[in-house]
Amino acid sequence: MRNSTLVKRAGHVDAQATPLRAAILAAHGVYAKAGGFRAVDVRFFFRLFGNWLEYDVLRPSLDIELTQLRRTLETLEKSDHLRRVKARREKRFLLTASGMLELAEKLVEECTVSYDEVLFVLLFATSYRGILRARIVASSAKISQATRRRLGALLDPARFVTRAVRHHERLAADLRDRLDADRGLDEQVQKLLVASAGEMTEQVVGTLVGVGGYQLERVQPLKHLLEILPDDLRRAELTAGIASRRRFLFEPLLVRTEQEIASLKKLASEIKPT
Protein backbone atom coordinates (compact mmCIF):
# COMPACT_ATOMS: atom_id res chain seq x y z
CA MET A 1 0.00 0.00 0.00
CA ARG A 2 1.27 3.44 -0.90
CA ASN A 3 2.30 5.57 2.05
CA SER A 4 2.46 8.97 0.39
CA THR A 5 4.46 11.85 1.77
CA LEU A 6 2.94 14.39 -0.60
CA VAL A 7 0.14 15.61 1.63
CA LYS A 8 -1.43 15.09 5.01
CA ARG A 9 -5.15 14.80 5.66
CA ALA A 10 -6.08 15.01 1.98
CA GLY A 11 -7.20 11.57 0.91
CA HIS A 12 -8.37 12.45 -2.60
CA VAL A 13 -5.15 14.28 -3.41
CA ASP A 14 -3.09 11.51 -1.86
CA ALA A 15 -4.82 8.90 -4.01
CA GLN A 16 -3.76 10.83 -7.12
CA ALA A 17 -0.20 11.46 -5.95
CA THR A 18 1.50 10.06 -9.07
CA PRO A 19 -0.07 12.33 -11.71
CA LEU A 20 -0.04 15.22 -9.24
CA ARG A 21 3.70 14.98 -8.56
CA ALA A 22 4.34 14.81 -12.29
CA ALA A 23 2.06 17.81 -12.84
CA ILE A 24 3.95 19.94 -10.29
CA LEU A 25 7.27 18.99 -11.87
CA ALA A 26 5.90 19.79 -15.33
CA ALA A 27 4.49 23.15 -14.26
CA HIS A 28 7.83 24.10 -12.75
CA GLY A 29 9.72 22.98 -15.85
CA VAL A 30 7.50 25.01 -18.19
CA TYR A 31 7.09 28.20 -16.14
CA ALA A 32 10.34 28.50 -14.16
CA LYS A 33 11.83 31.04 -16.57
CA ALA A 34 8.51 32.92 -16.77
CA GLY A 35 8.53 33.77 -13.08
CA GLY A 36 6.99 30.68 -11.55
CA PHE A 37 3.89 28.54 -11.89
CA ARG A 38 0.38 28.93 -10.52
CA ALA A 39 -1.99 26.37 -9.01
CA VAL A 40 -4.07 26.57 -12.18
CA ASP A 41 -1.01 25.54 -14.21
CA VAL A 42 -0.58 22.44 -12.06
CA ARG A 43 -4.23 21.59 -12.55
CA PHE A 44 -3.85 21.80 -16.33
CA PHE A 45 -0.96 19.32 -16.34
CA PHE A 46 -2.84 17.09 -13.88
CA ARG A 47 -5.74 17.00 -16.35
CA LEU A 48 -3.37 16.47 -19.28
CA PHE A 49 -1.68 13.49 -17.64
CA GLY A 50 -5.09 12.15 -16.61
CA ASN A 51 -6.08 12.33 -20.26
CA TRP A 52 -2.98 10.38 -21.26
CA LEU A 53 -3.94 7.74 -18.70
CA GLU A 54 -7.45 7.59 -20.20
CA TYR A 55 -9.00 8.80 -16.95
CA ASP A 56 -11.51 10.72 -19.09
CA VAL A 57 -12.97 7.32 -19.99
CA LEU A 58 -12.04 5.22 -16.97
CA ARG A 59 -12.67 7.81 -14.24
CA PRO A 60 -14.77 10.58 -15.80
CA SER A 61 -15.56 12.19 -12.44
CA LEU A 62 -11.89 12.52 -11.49
CA ASP A 63 -10.60 16.04 -11.07
CA ILE A 64 -8.80 18.14 -8.51
CA GLU A 65 -9.91 21.44 -7.01
CA LEU A 66 -7.72 24.51 -6.85
CA THR A 67 -8.25 24.63 -3.09
CA GLN A 68 -6.79 21.14 -2.77
CA LEU A 69 -3.86 22.11 -4.97
CA ARG A 70 -3.11 25.22 -2.93
CA ARG A 71 -3.07 23.15 0.26
CA THR A 72 -0.67 20.72 -1.37
CA LEU A 73 1.61 23.55 -2.46
CA GLU A 74 1.50 25.01 1.06
CA THR A 75 2.58 21.62 2.42
CA LEU A 76 5.53 21.58 0.03
CA GLU A 77 6.39 25.15 0.99
CA LYS A 78 6.46 24.31 4.70
CA SER A 79 8.92 21.53 3.91
CA ASP A 80 11.17 23.97 2.01
CA HIS A 81 10.49 22.09 -1.22
CA LEU A 82 8.75 25.11 -2.70
CA ARG A 83 9.10 28.88 -2.48
CA ARG A 84 6.69 31.63 -3.33
CA VAL A 85 7.64 34.14 -5.98
CA LYS A 86 6.51 37.74 -5.75
CA ALA A 87 3.83 38.45 -8.35
CA ARG A 88 1.42 41.30 -8.85
CA ARG A 89 -1.82 39.37 -9.22
CA GLU A 90 -1.61 35.63 -8.55
CA LYS A 91 0.54 33.54 -6.27
CA ARG A 92 3.38 31.93 -8.17
CA PHE A 93 5.73 29.23 -7.03
CA LEU A 94 9.07 27.65 -7.86
CA LEU A 95 10.35 24.29 -6.69
CA THR A 96 13.62 24.28 -4.84
CA ALA A 97 16.34 21.80 -5.80
CA SER A 98 15.33 19.63 -2.83
CA GLY A 99 11.70 19.86 -3.93
CA MET A 100 12.42 18.64 -7.44
CA LEU A 101 14.55 15.84 -6.05
CA GLU A 102 11.92 14.85 -3.48
CA LEU A 103 9.03 14.81 -5.96
CA ALA A 104 11.01 12.87 -8.57
CA GLU A 105 12.15 10.27 -6.05
CA LYS A 106 8.66 9.79 -4.62
CA LEU A 107 7.22 9.61 -8.13
CA VAL A 108 9.22 6.41 -8.54
CA GLU A 109 9.27 5.04 -4.99
CA GLU A 110 5.54 5.26 -4.33
CA CYS A 111 4.30 4.14 -7.73
CA THR A 112 3.47 0.44 -7.40
CA VAL A 113 -0.29 0.68 -7.35
CA SER A 114 -1.44 0.15 -10.91
CA TYR A 115 -0.09 -0.89 -14.28
CA ASP A 116 -1.23 2.33 -15.97
CA GLU A 117 0.63 4.45 -13.41
CA VAL A 118 3.74 2.30 -13.88
CA LEU A 119 3.64 2.96 -17.63
CA PHE A 120 3.14 6.67 -17.02
CA VAL A 121 6.11 6.95 -14.65
CA LEU A 122 8.23 4.91 -17.04
CA LEU A 123 7.34 7.37 -19.81
CA PHE A 124 8.15 10.31 -17.52
CA ALA A 125 11.48 8.80 -16.54
CA THR A 126 12.64 7.96 -20.05
CA SER A 127 11.55 11.32 -21.47
CA TYR A 128 12.52 13.85 -18.82
CA ARG A 129 15.21 12.31 -16.62
CA GLY A 130 18.10 14.24 -18.13
CA ILE A 131 16.25 17.55 -18.20
CA LEU A 132 15.15 17.22 -14.58
CA ARG A 133 18.61 16.36 -13.33
CA ALA A 134 20.04 19.39 -15.15
CA ARG A 135 17.38 21.62 -13.59
CA ILE A 136 18.19 20.35 -10.10
CA VAL A 137 21.91 21.02 -10.57
CA ALA A 138 21.21 24.50 -11.95
CA SER A 139 18.92 25.34 -9.01
CA SER A 140 21.31 24.25 -6.30
CA ALA A 141 24.10 26.46 -5.02
CA LYS A 142 26.06 23.45 -3.84
CA ILE A 143 25.67 19.78 -4.75
CA SER A 144 26.79 17.46 -1.96
CA GLN A 145 28.15 13.98 -2.60
CA ALA A 146 24.95 12.49 -1.17
CA THR A 147 22.86 14.58 -3.56
CA ARG A 148 25.08 13.57 -6.47
CA ARG A 149 24.46 9.92 -5.63
CA ARG A 150 20.73 10.55 -5.50
CA LEU A 151 20.89 12.33 -8.84
CA GLY A 152 22.65 9.34 -10.37
CA ALA A 153 19.75 7.06 -9.46
CA LEU A 154 17.04 9.64 -10.08
CA LEU A 155 14.25 8.43 -12.35
CA ASP A 156 16.39 5.55 -13.60
CA PRO A 157 13.94 3.78 -15.95
CA ALA A 158 15.82 0.48 -15.90
CA ARG A 159 15.76 0.28 -12.10
CA PHE A 160 12.15 1.42 -11.99
CA VAL A 161 10.84 -1.13 -14.48
CA THR A 162 12.82 -3.92 -12.78
CA ARG A 163 11.15 -3.06 -9.49
CA ALA A 164 7.75 -2.90 -11.18
CA VAL A 165 8.27 -6.38 -12.64
CA ARG A 166 9.16 -7.75 -9.19
CA HIS A 167 6.03 -6.19 -7.73
CA HIS A 168 3.83 -7.73 -10.43
CA GLU A 169 5.55 -11.09 -10.01
CA ARG A 170 4.73 -11.02 -6.28
CA LEU A 171 1.12 -10.29 -7.18
CA ALA A 172 1.05 -13.16 -9.66
CA ALA A 173 2.54 -15.53 -7.07
CA ASP A 174 -0.10 -14.51 -4.53
CA LEU A 175 -2.89 -15.12 -7.05
CA ARG A 176 -1.49 -18.57 -7.88
CA ASP A 177 -1.36 -19.40 -4.18
CA ARG A 178 -4.98 -18.27 -3.79
CA LEU A 179 -6.07 -20.41 -6.72
CA ASP A 180 -4.26 -23.49 -5.40
CA ALA A 181 -5.63 -22.96 -1.89
CA ASP A 182 -9.19 -22.47 -3.11
CA ARG A 183 -9.02 -25.57 -5.28
CA GLY A 184 -7.96 -27.52 -2.21
CA LEU A 185 -10.75 -25.90 -0.19
CA ASP A 186 -13.29 -26.78 -2.85
CA GLU A 187 -12.25 -30.42 -2.79
CA GLN A 188 -12.33 -30.52 1.01
CA VAL A 189 -15.80 -28.93 1.17
CA GLN A 190 -17.19 -31.45 -1.30
CA LYS A 191 -15.84 -34.37 0.74
CA LEU A 192 -17.20 -32.93 3.99
CA LEU A 193 -20.61 -32.30 2.47
CA VAL A 194 -20.81 -35.91 1.34
CA ALA A 195 -19.79 -37.09 4.81
CA SER A 196 -22.36 -34.82 6.49
CA ALA A 197 -25.18 -35.64 4.08
CA GLY A 198 -25.09 -32.15 2.62
CA GLU A 199 -25.52 -30.29 5.92
CA MET A 200 -23.40 -27.27 6.81
CA THR A 201 -22.88 -28.36 10.40
CA GLU A 202 -20.68 -26.61 12.97
CA GLN A 203 -18.27 -29.50 12.60
CA VAL A 204 -17.96 -28.83 8.87
CA VAL A 205 -17.42 -25.11 9.45
CA GLY A 206 -14.88 -25.71 12.22
CA THR A 207 -12.86 -28.05 10.00
CA LEU A 208 -12.40 -25.34 7.41
CA VAL A 209 -10.61 -22.85 9.66
CA GLY A 210 -7.31 -21.68 8.18
CA VAL A 211 -7.74 -23.26 4.76
CA GLY A 212 -8.39 -21.86 1.30
CA GLY A 213 -7.54 -18.45 -0.10
CA TYR A 214 -8.94 -16.55 2.88
CA GLN A 215 -6.22 -14.11 4.03
CA LEU A 216 -7.89 -12.16 6.83
CA GLU A 217 -7.72 -14.74 9.60
CA ARG A 218 -6.14 -12.26 12.03
CA VAL A 219 -8.81 -9.65 11.32
CA GLN A 220 -11.87 -11.90 11.29
CA PRO A 221 -11.31 -15.65 11.71
CA LEU A 222 -12.90 -17.66 8.92
CA LYS A 223 -14.83 -19.70 11.47
CA HIS A 224 -16.48 -16.56 12.86
CA LEU A 225 -17.25 -15.24 9.39
CA LEU A 226 -18.95 -18.46 8.38
CA GLU A 227 -20.88 -18.63 11.65
CA ILE A 228 -22.47 -15.20 11.17
CA LEU A 229 -23.60 -15.94 7.62
CA PRO A 230 -27.21 -17.05 7.16
CA ASP A 231 -27.55 -20.70 6.17
CA ASP A 232 -28.25 -19.96 2.50
CA LEU A 233 -25.31 -17.56 2.19
CA ARG A 234 -23.01 -19.98 4.01
CA ARG A 235 -23.94 -22.78 1.62
CA ALA A 236 -23.50 -20.51 -1.39
CA GLU A 237 -20.13 -19.32 -0.13
CA LEU A 238 -18.82 -22.83 0.48
CA THR A 239 -20.11 -24.29 -2.78
CA ALA A 240 -20.59 -22.04 -5.81
CA GLY A 241 -18.80 -19.10 -4.20
CA ILE A 242 -15.39 -20.78 -4.14
CA ALA A 243 -15.47 -21.77 -7.80
CA SER A 244 -16.96 -18.42 -8.82
CA ARG A 245 -14.12 -16.50 -7.17
CA ARG A 246 -11.62 -18.54 -9.10
CA ARG A 247 -13.40 -18.28 -12.43
CA PHE A 248 -14.50 -14.65 -12.36
CA LEU A 249 -11.87 -12.96 -10.19
CA PHE A 250 -8.59 -14.70 -9.40
CA GLU A 251 -8.05 -16.42 -12.77
CA PRO A 252 -8.73 -13.29 -14.87
CA LEU A 253 -6.55 -11.21 -12.52
CA LEU A 254 -3.72 -13.70 -12.92
CA VAL A 255 -4.03 -13.68 -16.70
CA ARG A 256 -3.95 -9.87 -16.73
CA THR A 257 -0.98 -9.72 -14.35
CA GLU A 258 1.01 -12.22 -16.41
CA GLN A 259 0.33 -10.17 -19.54
CA GLU A 260 1.47 -7.02 -17.74
CA ILE A 261 4.69 -8.75 -16.63
CA ALA A 262 5.42 -9.80 -20.22
CA SER A 263 4.77 -6.26 -21.43
CA LEU A 264 7.00 -4.68 -18.78
CA LYS A 265 9.83 -7.12 -19.54
CA LYS A 266 9.56 -6.23 -23.23
CA LEU A 267 9.75 -2.52 -22.41
CA ALA A 268 12.72 -3.18 -20.10
CA SER A 269 14.60 -4.82 -22.97
CA GLU A 270 14.07 -1.69 -25.08
CA ILE A 271 15.45 0.78 -22.53
CA LYS A 272 18.84 2.11 -23.55
CA PRO A 273 21.43 2.43 -20.76
CA THR A 274 22.24 5.99 -19.72
Image (cartoon, rainbow, N blue to C red):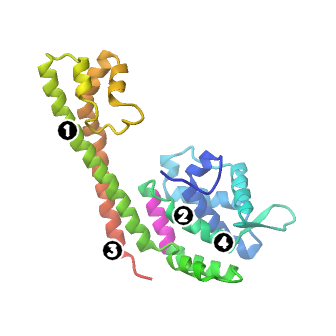
User: Mark 1 or mark 3: which is in front?
Assistant: 1
The residue lying toward the viewer, choosing from 133 and 201, is 201
Residue denoted by label 4:
98
Relative to 202, say whether 262 is above or below.
below
Decide if residue 205 is on the left or right side of residue 16.
Answer: left
Residue at horizontal 32 percent and vertical 67 percent from the top = 265
- Secondary structure under tag 4 reads helix
Residue denoted by label 3:
269
Q: Tag 2: residue type?
A: Leu
Q: How far separated are the C-alphas under marks 2 and 4?
A: 14 Å
In the picture, the disc for residue 107 is 2
Residue denoted by label 1:
183
Q: Earlier in the sequence, mark 1 or mark 2?
A: 2
Q: How far separated are the C-alphas under marks 1 and 2?
A: 39 Å
Decide if residue 192 is on the left or right side of residue 225.
Answer: left
Residue stretch in magenta: 117-126
Q: Tag 4: residue type?
A: Ser
Q: Tag 3: residue type?
A: Ser
The reply to whether dot 4 and dot 3 touch (C-beta < 8 Å) is no
Q: How far separated are the C-alphas under marks 2 and 3?
A: 22 Å
- Secondary structure under tag 2 reads helix
Q: Earlier in the sequence, mark 2 or mark 4?
A: 4
Measuring from the top left, give residue 87's x and y in whole percent. Answer: 84, 67
User: Mark 2 or mark 4: which is in front?
Assistant: 4
Residue at horizontal 64 percent and vertical 59 percent from the top = 44
The residue lying toward the viewer, choosing from 229 and 28, is 229
User: Mark 2 or mark 3: which is in front?
Assistant: 2
